[in-house]
Each structure stands twice: as structure tokens, then as C-alpha cells.
Amino acid sequence: MKLCDKSVTELHDMLINRKCSAKELLTDVTERAKSIQSALNCYITFNEKASEEAEEADRRLAAGDKVTMLTGIPVAVKDNISTKGLKTTCASRMLENYIPPYDATVIEKLKSAGAIISGKTNMDEFAMGSASDTGIFGAVGNPVESGFSAGGSSGGSAAAVASGAAVIALGSDTGGSVRQPASFCGVVGFCPSYGAVSRYGLIAFASSLDRIGSLGRNVTDAFLLHNIINGADSKDVTTIRKNFSFNPSKSLNGVKIGIPNEIFNAFISEEVSECINNSLNILKKHGAQLVEVSLPSVKEAVKAYYIISSAEASSNLARYDGVRYGHRCKVSSTLADFYKKSRSEGFGLEVKRRIMLGTFVLSEGYSDSYYKRAVALRNKIYQEYDNAFQCCDIIASPVYPQTCISFDEPQQFTDRYMSDIFTVPSNLAGLPAISIPCGKSRSGMPVGMQLIGNRFEDSRVFETAYGFELYGGAFCGY
Amino acid sequence: MEINIKHIAELAMLEINDDEANMIAEEMLEMIDMVSDLPELYDESCMSCEMELREDKAAVCEQSSEDLLNNAVETYKNCFTVPRTVEH
């Protein structure tokens, strides 16, 4: 097994005991990343300064300085997270040449911990999409079969981790964009409680829904990454002061797993259904109790999600006017014409669709019928989850109705929106959720199972996922 | 339902020509059809989100003017430039 395929725990042990150097590890990861770049297109930018960072990590290790589990470990970063001096494009022409003058809080934390930023990963433009195919740098292929999508919008991060082009990676999750690609690529993808991880430096899509999530080839790796990046931040007032522990010795015995009727009665493909049911049986066999719960409004959640996220996106993306940064049109007549041309040339089709929808649902005469009712529905969903968690500890569900998205089979965009049915409800309610590999389709495409916890019960989500991983869920490699 | 696409585009500061307007109008109707039929609910209260607000004091900017001007396509004497807005 090459260095780039090992876990964080194994690599940390090797680095501490000088069985390998951070430089050797980075070289291995970079070689793997570049060898698969043309097939999978995981990266937008490789970090040319990573080598210096690895040398510094080696110096710290050799000097016996205080180090963390992530010292010397290459981490890939989704390209909507600001990295000082390193292009951050959101896979958009609007920010094609944008170089942030500051690091996101999560990046500052990673650098303090001695992690190495290997590069910026490919994604859907401004994180709007489910197949990492709306960005200007091309689509991200699935490591199992490159004719299928790696999922989105954090497809580059998920594919990089799955293929050894990164050891661990950061993604962002607004409606499932960490969990769904994790499911498609057969890795673990964790979306934290809203407020657990600072959004300072995350280029905003929908501010009440966005989270920065962690991806790894196993639950422990995902936790180790989350453990470094989480915490209160004065630059993000929505963050909370809470430390999250992880006790891998906790068993599944007595854990109540909620099975929402409405989710399991929705359309789920036979192959996904088979994998999820097998996984529930494994959980039950090892001491968990399966409990029926009800989330009556969950099927309507997608509607509320697309109204609220588009409304917030239309506001957040209003900052892109071509003046201070971003794409600027070459010819215009008036200031308004300058704004319109710069924005229309800079944004892709999917982004424009969502800005238009968001503008419409907030416009005079329509905001009562659409936006306010969507907010009310969101509140109801939040209450329903709260009620469900009175009788269970964790809620289980599929991540996506199908096993994969094929690039050869064009899909109606509204059908693709509706397929977010299993991931968006927990985003609306601010809940932590994880996708963990739980099987494969007959053609070998990975399938993930989703475990959702109550707000700020991130530890319990990790512990339950770890328990399942011991008995049934595991990254199998390719 | 009829949507005034040009008006929405104007509000969104996006430029669309007549051909695009037809296509976008169709897509908008599909999206609105998808999200319509929401339950009749009117609870607008916000979900609880405790926030520790910072003091109302101007913070020292960690970035220099040069840092902040670096991403602009065009600058002039330490200023961002925009098309002329004042008639003379």
C-alpha cells in the first residue's frame, strides 16, 4: 500500500517514528493526484508552496516540537474556501483569477496544526449543483468509473480522497454537497451542526445553510479533520462554543436508530434500498434498536430548500459586480450596464437560474407566497426532527435515491433538484449528518448510508458511524 | 402564471436577450411549479441561534490597501475604478 492510501492514524505514527517524512508523503500524494488528473479532474490548482510546508512539518517533527495528528498530512481544500495567496475560484469565471488576501479560519487552523494544503479541488460553480459538472474547469469523474459523476458539489474533494490524491479533504455542504459525493465515491463525508465550524472565509452560497465538512477514507480520519477545524470564532457570530469528543469505544448497544416512514416510502432505487436495509440489519444485529419515527413534512423539504437557498444566494452573489474583484466586462455604457454585463459574463447557467429564482421569491407580491411560507415550513421541519429525537438517538436514511449520476444520461434539472430529498432536510434544521459507505451496486458503484443526529450531537453521529464501520461500512479502495 | 423575466433580470442585475428570456421563462416556470404548492403555514419566527456579537468598534484591518486592490482588474491612484456615473 502506498503512503497516499494510508489513514491519518497510520501516517501520523509513521511520521512520528520517522518511518517516512512529510515530504515523501506529499510527493506520493501529488504524484497520484497528477497521474489521475486527466481522468478524474479532481483539482483546479495544486499548491506550489506545499513542499515548503512539508519541509517545515519535517523540521517540527525532527525537533520534537509539539505536533498534532494532522502535522505533515496533505489536505485537499474545496475551491470555495479562501486560501491566502492561492487562487480560490469557486469553479466560476467570475472568480477565475481571484487570489484571496486572507485565509479562512479553517485554513488558519489547519496551518497551525501543521497540515499541508495539497491544492484546491474542483466543484460545481459556487457550490450550486449535485454532480460537480456546472463549473468552468470541467466535470469531476468518479474514481470507480470516470464516466459517472463523483457527485457534487464537493466532487473534487471526495474523488481526491477516494483515489489517494489526498489523504483527507475539506468540502462544503449546503444541501448535501459533502455527503452525496462521499456516498458516490465510497468515502466518509461529515456535515457538522450549523455553527460547529466557522464559515469565515467560506465563499457564501446560502448563509443559513452552509457548513464546512470533512471527508476521509474512514470515520476516524473524518473526525480528526473535524476536530481541528471546529470551534467558536469571533469572525463568525453563528459559531458556538462547544468541544466535540469522540469515544470510539462506545458500542452500538442500545442506540436507538430512527427510521422515518416518509423517507423510506419515497422513491429509492432497488440497489440503494438493498444496501440500506442490509446496513440497518447490521446495526440491529450489533445491539442497535430500530424505531419508527415520523417526519411528516420531510418530503416538502426540497421545495423549502430551493426557495430559501436561492433567495440567500441571490443576496450573497449580489456582491459580484466586477468593481473590487472578480470578472469585469470590457465594454459597457452605464454603471448599471457594467454591472449586468460583468455578472452575466461571469456567472454560468446554473448560478443564473438560482439567482433568478431567488430574486423572484423575494420580489414584491411573491415573497409572502414563497419565501415566508418556505421559512415557516423550515420551522415545522425543525420541530418535527426535535419531536423525532425524543424517541431516538440517530436517524438513518439513504443519501441519494440512485447509486450514481451518469454523464451520458442528461437529466432534467428539476429532477436533479428533487433528488436532494434525503440530504436537504437536515441542512434546513441545522443538524449534523454523516455519509458512510454501506455497500455497492451490482456494477460496483459505492452506496452510502446517512446517519443524522440532533443539533450539536456531532459526537454521537461520529460514534454511531464508527460502530457501524467496525461491522459493515468501510472504504474498500479501487 | 406569467413571470416578467426582464423585470426579474433587472432586479438581479443580469443581462438577458430575447432568446434567452424565452428559455429562462420556461425554466423559471418549471422551477416555480416544483416549489409551489407549499403548505399553508405562516410561522415566521426564526429558529433559535444564539450569537455572541462582537463589540461595535471598528476593527483594524489585517490586510493592506495593496492587498485589497490586488484583485481589481483596474485601479487608479489607490482607488477602484468604475464607469463614469456623473454627467458633466
Image (spheres, grey):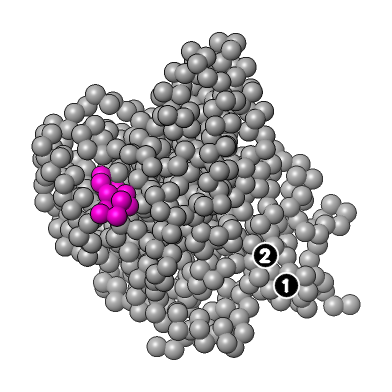
Q: Position of residue A216 (x, y in %)?
A: 41, 37
> Label 1: few (<14), some or many (≥20) within 10 Å?
many
**Residue at 34%, 75% in the rendered image:** B34
**Residue at 34%, 28% in the rendered image:** A245
- Quarter of image, res B36: bottom left
- Residue hosting label 1: A338
Q: Which residues are magenta?
A: A438-448
**Residue at 10%, 37% in the rendered image:** A285
| A121 vs A137: above or below | above
CA gap between label 1 and label 2 equals 8 Å
Q: Secondary structure at mark 2?
A: loop
Subunit bearing disc 1: A
> Label 2: few (<14), some or many (≥20) within 10 Å?
many
Of residues A64 and B2, the one drawn nearer to the viewer in this rendering: A64
Residues under numbered marks 1 and 2 in contact, where contact means CB atoms less than 8 Å apart:
yes
| A282 vs A181: above or below | above
| B22 vs A335: above or below | below
Q: Secondary structure at mark 1?
A: helix
Residue type at numbered disc 1: Phe
- Residue hosting label 2: A321
Does A396 sit left or right of B11 as displayed?
left
Residue type at numbered disc 2: Asp
Which is more N-terminal, label 2 or label 1?
Answer: 2
Residue A442: say if magenta: yes
Does A121 sit left or right of A446 as displayed?
right
Subunit bearing disc 2: A
Q: Position of residue A26 (x, y in %)?
A: 57, 30
Q: Is residue A366 visible?
A: yes
Q: Position of residue B44 (x, y in %)?
A: 35, 63
**Residue at 76%, 56% in the rendered image:** B72
Residue B60: say if magenta: no
